[in-house]
Amino acid sequence: MALRRLSVVCVLTVLLAGSLRAAAQDVAIAVHDDPRVAQALELAQTWLDAERAYQQVPGLSASIVLDQTALWTGAFGVADLASGKPAAPGTIYSICSISKLFTSIAVMQERDAGRLRLDDPVRRHLPWFTMKPGGKDGTEITVEGLLTHAAGLPREADVPYWSAPLFAFPTREKVLERVANQTALYPSETYFQYSNLGLTLAGETVAATSGTSYADYVRTNILEPLKLASTTPEMPEAQQGKRLATGYSALGRDGKRQRVRFFTTKGIAPAAGYASTAEDLARFASWQFRLLESGGTEVLKASTLREMQRVHWVDPDFKTMWGLGFFVEDRDGKAFVGHGGSCPGYRTAFLLQPEAKLATVVMANASGVAVDDWAKRVYDIVAPAVKAATKEPGKAKPADPKMRAYAGTYTAQPWGGEIAVLPWDDGLAMLGLPTDDPVKDLVKLKKAGEHTFRRIRKDETPGEEVLFEMDADGRAERFKRHSNYNNRLK
């Protein structure tokens, strides 16, 4: 009877998970088709592509995820400047420190399996780890301290692997050799100190407690079950010139970016080695939303994921918060979690708002690019539209197709780059590009006559006229505002 009851429970759990997933997909499809969301997605794409172009980033891939559905996944620019190969949603990038999320999940799997505890001293599982805690109180360096970056460890293994041009990442053996001579920076559990060495040790702990190599462990227990077929715990050398984007440096004084040589992170792969795609990271986000909604177990227990995404460390200045592997950030009373990545030639961002079940992924093949801010701005563009569409499905009127005749980009030279005009609500919106804050700088226009619009002020009263002049095909060729003209670019 016990076995029969267990089978019934398992069947019901699977059916419940399936029904929840189907319901979530139905909601996401309805939201995706909402005119407000379609307009927000167009604005996000227009803004992202402009940021990429004005900052001379070769290529960019991105995804916007609502629960189990990618509202949009796309790419701009090129994966390689020499060949001109276009970037694509399936282009592979180094995700560098986003690797730490996978390592942290592996640690928590081992914790849930009873093979380690978060308060275990690291040396219990890694006898060769003989670094003494900083300070005089002798507080142990624990597994939890590795995941929260509060162990007081040095930021890096004692090898200059971030130094150009070689980026000579150490072997595992070299990391172990050098760590014996390193000393802690601070007493454990005193300050937040971001540490690639710490998450490298976390990966070593997983290998020690599981009895298998780190790479084999994460492939078998995380990547394959989640069907992340394009995600690897090390840079895929065989994909050079194929799906792997070529990395480029930060901009020099000459306004150019230099090609960065291919690298593999070797011994610090658990902290910085992974490569992935916008499509796979979208799936990774959907898994987290699905797991949290179901309350069940899929690769990880839902309660464990919630535990990871709660604050486990707050720095004394109350400005830095960290979960178990995840950063945790408060923005206007909403909790955001995720991680960023910065390796030679690549910048990536993975941002989730669990309550809204909304995630943004941005990946660039260039250093010195604020993709973390880009992911936040994309969220700010899309989230209000998704919220409105979810709260009042089917209430928004379809956009007037006649507005498309005015849409496009218009020159703003020499004062600025360009002005994008897009359908918005029942009229138009204008956005000067480039801009750091597309939501704040968006200007709404309401139709006031044939080819004539009025700017809508912040107090909702009408401002000056914007008059579009049309070409023989009925398409706007320029607009007149404040008695001056802006000509169409495209």
Image (tube, grey):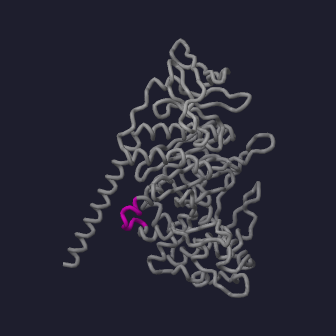
Residue 17 appears in the figure: yes
Q: Quadrant of the N terminus?
A: bottom left
Query: Could you say which is closer to the camera, residue 267 or residue 39?
Result: 39
The extreme bottom residue here reads 137
Query: Is residue 319 magenta-colored?
Result: no
Residue 239 appears in the figure: no
Residue at image location 48% in from the left, 37% down from the top: 39
- With respect to residue 268, does 422 lie above or below? above
- With respect to residue 287, does 300 lie above or below? below
Q: Position of residue 60 (x, y in %)?
A: 60, 44
Q: Position of residue 334 (x, y in %)?
A: 52, 59
Q: Which residues are magenta?
A: 290-299
Residue at image location 39% in from the left, 48% down from the top: 390
Q: Position of residue 144 (x, y in %)?
A: 57, 76
Q: Quadrant of the C terminus?
A: top right
The extreme top residue here reads 472
Residue at image location 64% in from the left, 64% down from the top: 266
The extreme right residue here reads 253
Q: Position of residue 119 (x, y in %)?
A: 55, 82
Q: Quadrant of residue 16?
A: bottom left
Residue 475 horizontal side relative to residue 163, left or right: left
Query: Could you say which is closer to the camera, residue 345 or residue 133?
Result: 133
Q: How many marks?
A: 0
